[in-house]
Image (cartoon, coloured by chain):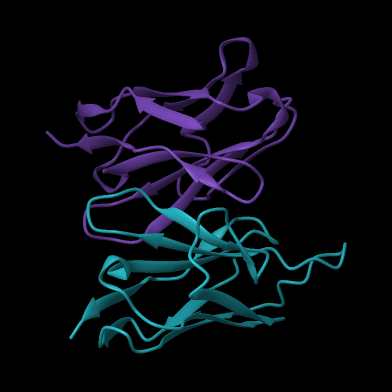
Amino acid sequence: DVVMTQSPLSLPVTLGQPASISCRSSQSLVYSDGNTYFNWFQQRPGQSPRRLIYKVSNRDSGVPDRFSGSGSGTDFTLNISRVEAEDVGVYYCMQYTHWPRTFGQGTKVEIK
Amino acid sequence: EVQLVESGGGLVQPGGSLRLSCAASGFTFSSHSMSWVRQAPGKGLEWVSYISGSSSITYYADSVKGRFTISRDNAKSSLYLQMESLRAEDTAVYYCASGWGVDFWGQGTLVTVSS
């Protein structure tokens, strides 16, 4: 199975400051069609997960543009340009290039 | 508006069975693959199973293979997960999610396996 490793696992941030979460996969996530099937999800307290980013860098509809995704191959990053109070929660990466689909352990974002 | 509504969760004894359902609306259900993902209390996300739009392709996590069966009824826009031989470690909130990219999730249904 592809192992997804996130860092850090806990991220205290100051409102208005940037934040960055890393995710590394144990194998390349480039599929035979040339696409890289990699998502970022946000799970706010008490809510279901919500997809933020798909195929590395594409923002879902309604996702604020302060969220951005980047990376390639085995190394990926989620950036929040200026953290707001509503961004508190746990962020997960997920690959869907290989079977079984696998998630990272989650990164808990909290306000300092 | 896309909606996924799970049901069928509850308390079941170890070794027991349960059938989860997911009612979909707001999109062409038959054109989309579907998945089940679970989350144990206080833990992270674990992908469980996948089914293609036509039901011709299914995949399972090793942890549930041989015990869980995913199915769908496109006429009813519904997804199912038949769970057999349940174990304590199957205790979790079970989410259904739409699309190849697991793009939209329901609110989840809690399954508790305990004597």
Where is residue A26 drawn, in percent x and y?
61, 79
**Which residue extends farthest top?**
B75
Image position of B48 (left or right of A106): right
Where is residue B77 drawn, in percent x and y?
57, 18
Give the residue displayed 74% in from the left and 68% down from the top. Answer: A36
Where is residue B6 drawn, in percent x and y?
38, 28
Q: Is residue B114 above or below residue B5?
A: below
Visual hue assigned to chain A: cyan
Give the residue displayed 32% in from the left and 85% down from the top. Answer: A16
Please tell me in which quadrant of the rendered image residue A106 appears.
bottom left
Image position of B64 (left or right of A31): left
Please tell me in which quadrant of the rendered image residue B16 appears.
top left
Where is residue A68 drawn, in percent x and y?
56, 75
* Screen quadrant of the C terminus of chain A: bottom left
Give the number of callouts. 0
**Which residue extends farthest right?**
A33
* Screen quadrant of the N terminus of chain A: bottom right
Q: Is residue A2 above or below residue B55?
A: below
- Closer to us: A108 or A6: A108
- Closer to us: B26 or B30: B26
Give the residue displayed 30% in from the left and 42% down from the top. Answer: B93
Give the residue displayed 75% in from the left and 28% down from the top. Answer: B56
Colour purple maps to chain: B
Image position of A93 (left or right of B34): left
